Image: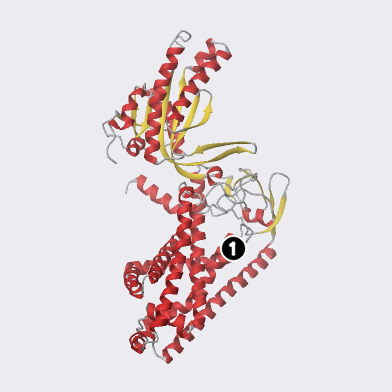
Amino acid sequence: MAPSARQQLREFFRGIGLRQVRLACGTILFAYLVSHFLNHALGNISLDALAWGVEWHTAFWQFPPIAFIFYGACLVHSGLGIWALYQRRQFGWKAIEPLQLLLGLSIPFLIIAHIVGVRLSHTLYGHEKLYPQELYIFFVGARQRLWPMLAVLVIAWVHGCIGLYFWLRMRSFFKRAAPFLLAAAVLIPTLALLGVYQGGRTVIADSTDPAWRHDNLSAQHVGTLEQADMLDRITSGMTIGYVGLLALVLLARGGRAILERRGGMISLSYGNGRTVRVPKGLSVLEASLRHNVPHASVCGGRARCSTCRIRIIGDCSMLPEPSPREAFVLGRVGSTDPSVRLACQLKPTTDLSFFQLFTPHTMSANAHASNPTRIGQERYLVSLFVDMRGSTQLAETRLPFDTVFIVNRFLSAVSQAVIENGGQPNQFVGDGMLALFGLASSRQQACRQALRAAAQIGKNIEELNEFLSHDLPEPIRFGIGIHGGEVIVGDIGYRDHMVFTALGDAVNVAARLQDMTKLLGCEAIFSEEVRITAGLAADALPQQEVAIRGRNEPMTVRTVDDTRTLSAVASGDQVVAA
């Protein structure tokens, strides 16, 4: 395995924590739930449709490899839910999060009777309980079982939807997909419950027929009274065992709290004069929430963002080592300083002084992330850096106001080209500018928009040079760097001085490609990533391998001597079929 591949694999496993495992298992269970609900919805057609659907449903989920993954996910997800009840020390985040935990812990309690009655009875006695038998029990034989079953369907669905919401809300596509996801979240369970109701009505009518009862309620299907009594005892035992396990967890929480208080308290100083006393074992973020100290945390303490970062004041040698997940997140944001830690992961054992790196006035753990784009979101964008050449020499020979006038005319020409091609001027640094593409378009569109913008920049600057020809000893020259990739976009700054911008490796690479245009003597350089995503032909422009500062391996780029030639390339004349 190549070193880079090993490094990528190592980084992948560093990013996996208990939350990621729980999310993966929960996604598998939610996929099963969707399949089961769609099967229930067939009851709106007929019992035959239900029977047809359950054959396909069972064939897929009982296929040995799939069944192994499914049952493993059930056990792991349930176990991690119980562990979360023990581990969680602070329930003051948002009402929806303790609700999700409570709903998840109630599912095994409500579903035990169904699992024993269907799966275990089939394993022990070979019973064939399908929709006719189950619907008969719920609507005719033991109607008191219907309401717990309907309740567990709703609870499991709401629990899964909350989990998906927490996972997807920070994704770039969520805002566009939210109306469709909401429609599915309402329609699927509604159709499923209606399907159960319609199937139950059909069974009530059919059960009056002795022939139907003979075919569907035989001992082979529903078992004998002795077998039913044994299954009831197993159900009772498993229910008592589960309730006892939850009680043990609650007792363990109480015991832990007593031991922690006996083990001593520590002081946390926030660098602004505020100091709190907490037991050892709490994370810094949990301590902030317990004492109502505002603390930024976009992801709610899930180690999926770095907004809760703190900088330790003083000696860091006594701090616990970062967990693999914390090291992964800090690595993603390029933090190698040992004094910078994630407040949601750091559990100090001694007195600690620190200050927060992100202002809590705009981002707090108990504030709703109503606009994730503004508070931080990971998404694919194309960054275009453009810089004016020779502005320093220009300033040495001209009056300050004349220099400012020329630079502003240059930036106006560049900004006009960016805006007209669907981009957004983002940062102005002296005589340079960062533009972002893809905030409201697809990846391919963003890459093509950036290339077309580069072409128009060349045309606009040519016109500007003609306009200023009488006043400039030589034409204005420029360099452009373009690269696409995953970046973090959001508001950066302090209080009233917040600006919306992008951070990440892709932005840095675009800036370095712009610098490289000086060495290679060209007007623009864009990465192979942009060429491939835009769908340009492989032979459209010269290819070159260059070394990028901060990267171990050389990078393939395309050089453009005259940006005006990009107009034909990006307009589709040399675009290959996607």
- Give the image's coloring scheme: secondary structure
- Give the vertical position of 377 relative to 17 (above or below): above
**Residue 317 placed where, x, y %?**
60, 48
- The vertical placement of 329 against 193, above or below, is above
Q: In this rendering, does residue 82 appear at all?
A: no
Q: Name the spot of residue 435 as percent of width and height, x first.
A: 47, 31
Q: Is residue 215 visible?
A: yes
Relative vertical location of residue 367 with respect to residue 118 in this rendering, above or below? above
Position in image of residue 339 (x %, y %) = 59, 44
* Residue closer to the observer: 539 or 557: 539
Nearest the eye: 109 or 504: 109
Q: Secondary structure at mark 1?
A: helix
Total labels: the figure holds: 1
Q: Position of residue 416 (x, y in %)?
A: 47, 26
Q: Residue furthest left?
A: 539
Disc 1 marks which amino acid?
A: Pro
Seen from this angle, which residue lies furthest bottom? 226
List the residue tagged with mark 1.
98
Q: Residue extending furthest top?
A: 470
10 Å crowding of disc 1: few (<14), some (14-19), many (20+) = some
Residue 520 sits above or below residue 108 on the image:
above
User: Residue placed at 55% from the left, 37% from the top?
Assistant: 500
Residue drawn at x 50%, y 68% as measured from the top left: 154
- Dividing the image into 4 quarters, which one contains the C terminus? top left
